[in-house]
Amino acid sequence: MTTRSLTRRRVAKTALATTALVGMPFVRGAHAAGSLSIGFWDHWVPGANKATEDLVKEWGEKEKVETKIDYITSQGNKLLLTVAAEAQAKSGHDILAFSTWLPAEHAERLEPVNDLMEPLIKQNGAVNATVEYLGKQGGKWLAVPATVGSQIKGPCSRIDLMKQHAGIDVQAMYPAGAEPKAENWTFDTFLKAAEACHKGGNPFGIGLGITSDSVDTIGAVFHGYGAQLVDAKGNITVKSDAVRQALDYYKRLMAFLPPDVPAWDDASNNKWLVSGRGAMIMNPPSAWAVAKRDAPQVAEQCWTHGMPAGPKGRYAPFLPFFWGVWNFGKNKSAAKSLLLHMSQPSAAEKMVAASGGYDLPSFANLTTFKTWAEEGPPKGTLYHYPNPYNHQVLSIAAAPAPPKIAVQIYNQGLMTKMAVRHFQGEAIDKTIAWAESELEGFMRT
Amino acid sequence: MADIAVPRAGTAVGAGGRASLHRLMQRKSTIAFLMALPLILVISLLVAYPAFYSIYLATLNKSMERFVGLGNFSFLFGRETFWLVVKQSCIFAITAVIFKALIGFVVAHFVHNIPAKGQRKWRGMLLVPWVIPPAMSTLAWLWLFDPSYSAFNWILAIFGIDPVPWTGNAHWARFAVILVNIWVGAPFFMIMYLAALKSVPEQLYEAAAIDGATWWQRIWYVTLPMMRNIIAITALFSLIVTFANFDIVRVLTAGGPLDYTHIFATWAFRVGIESGDIPLGASVSLFMVPILAVAAWFILRDINQRGNEA
């Protein structure tokens, strides 16, 4: 097979003209341009991988590039281990999926993708500050935010139970097809609702373990109080009134949660909702999708909506996935060409549709696809999932600490541990002193 | 054995014969070495190389760009969580090994006393926990201990007993991980002790019976001394494996709640892979190597000395 390399110049040239070239082939000509190996995250929504498979196939045929896709599960940390192994071996896939913190962790080994991101932002709208925080360092874009796997972990409430116990009509607060009317949806209202649902026998299912769902929720609450453990410059700022307020709030909230929440993992809250025991969980629509299959009467009562607002703003946990290219990759130009293809609005729409609305593009102009408006039952249940009115700030726990510190705060569940220690009776000063000592350990370079 | 060259009758065994025999033996050892070479290579590749590579990693700084010598270890010694992990690893390994040894010893005696006809069936059944991959069997235990839907709690509820936070409370979580480790590991002790019991000469028990030894005296003065070597080797082997355990804790509690069930391997994974500090993770996982090596040296020396005395 005759091969022709894709040059950097070609990529740059095409990227600059992205808007005009949407839907047009990147490498034109009859010759093939080598082969490309891709490691995508293995989607847990059945059939969702088909969208990426089709898009890659379509691009490969057009560009005469032989493609090979590996779908790598995140179960058992397989994706994390694959990334670590490839980084150590300096060999691996030409394109690889990187979960939330991994681009920053491997910044030195990733090929800059500014030549893709700048035109994509012009075309698809701005990315939120969290994507920038995680995917860009010192003006260098480390990876392209992926639609597949990116998610907001806002509340998924039971319409009936919230009305019955707390007197809150979540559909009226977040009406399908219209702007949110959630001025009164604050931390105080949330706490009262948690208390009412607890009394009514359907407590909120908010975990306090150290897995992602638990950490994301507490992270959003800390942001709502303006509480930072470490500031953007890397200074430890845990001894603050804001941190005390956030811990105090969580202590009051925990009294209305199931007693075993410190042991919850990412499956526990899903089970809590699907079993019909809880009035609310914090999750992307995967729990609702499982309920649709296993407990349709529960799914019909689910409504995904925005987070309550704290004194310093309304923050929702956002976990983007990225697609990155190793700087030791063998076919970087072709990889970038494919990433450009995968980041087009039409491609994003296909991925969103294939995932039943689970996947989220990170670009501002791509939050109003019809999938979110039409998915149900109940119809419109996902309308507010992609934050179409920028009603809340998309954030990640442990930000704005430098990512190499933040990833340790996040993965070691420092905030949830603080909350549990304080809830179990430890004096707040002691909890904060313990956290400060842990943070000192995270400052290693 | 066919390996030994037997001189024919009437043939003088001179210096030349000895030399050729020597050459023959040399050739055989060469062949033996060549036959073992693939295994040596596999061990070098899969055991020796990773071991030395992890030692190398443990001497680097977090970004793996600078040699820091023993800096990672001195950093660890200043961390409260590290000493918590050391304490827990010791509690976990020592408690589990003691109970595995006790249960294995008792069950081995029961099985030994079962008539030969049905013994095989019992041996097979008792080995089941040990032959199932621990990650799989621990999943089943996880469902039994599930925070919200524990089968054990369901049974307790029938008797009006409050639910137990099996994995949500530090002490219960420690109990749970140790219990599962004992469940998985006790059959190994049982089968080793059973083999040892079968090798104790029956005459010793007969002599003890003639001397009027009680049941306990027979155990103390006959069985235990005869099993001493196998007990030492089994305990050492199990101690090393239990200290290095990963799957049971990872699946059951992931080190929680509040890090109270972390052991070396799970914390090394959390620090090294999940939190992006591979050198520190390597240092955590290597911390026990010198301690276990010294323990192994003493135990093996003791066994060797006893072997020489015999």
Image: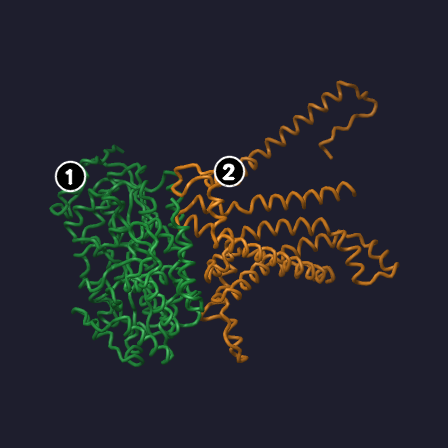
Chain colours: A green, B orange
Q: Quadrant of residue A265?
A: bottom left
Q: Nearer the viewer, residue B187 or A434?
A: A434
What's the residue type where badge 1 is placed?
Answer: Lys
The answer to whether any part of residue B274 appears in the image is no
- Report whether B12 appears left or right of A123: right
Which residue matches tag 2?
A: B52
Q: Considering depth in this image, is A365 or A439 the residue closer to the camera? A: A439
> In front: A190, or B142?
A190
- Do we see residue B104 in this rendering? yes
Q: Residue furthest left?
A: A20
What is the chain identity of the residue bearing mark 2?
B
**B41 relative to A214, above or below:** above
Q: Is residue A148 above or below residue A197?
A: above
The percent position of residue B118, horizontal first and vertical second, equals 70, 62
Instruction: Please state which amino acid type lies under the numbered disc 2.
Output: Phe
Name the residue: 52% across, 71% down. Answer: B152
Q: Position of residue A441 (x, y in %)?
A: 42, 50
- Would you call the spot at circle 2 few (<14 residues within 10 Å), some (14-19), or many (20 or more)? few
Residue A279 lies left or right of residue A58; in this view the side is right
Residue A13: image tag: 1
C-alpha separation, residue under disc 1 versus residue under disc 2? 47 Å
Q: In the drawing, what numbered circle is on residue A203?
A: none
| Screen quadrant of the N terminus of chain A | top left
Relative placement, left or right, of B27 versus A163 is right
- Label 1: chain? A
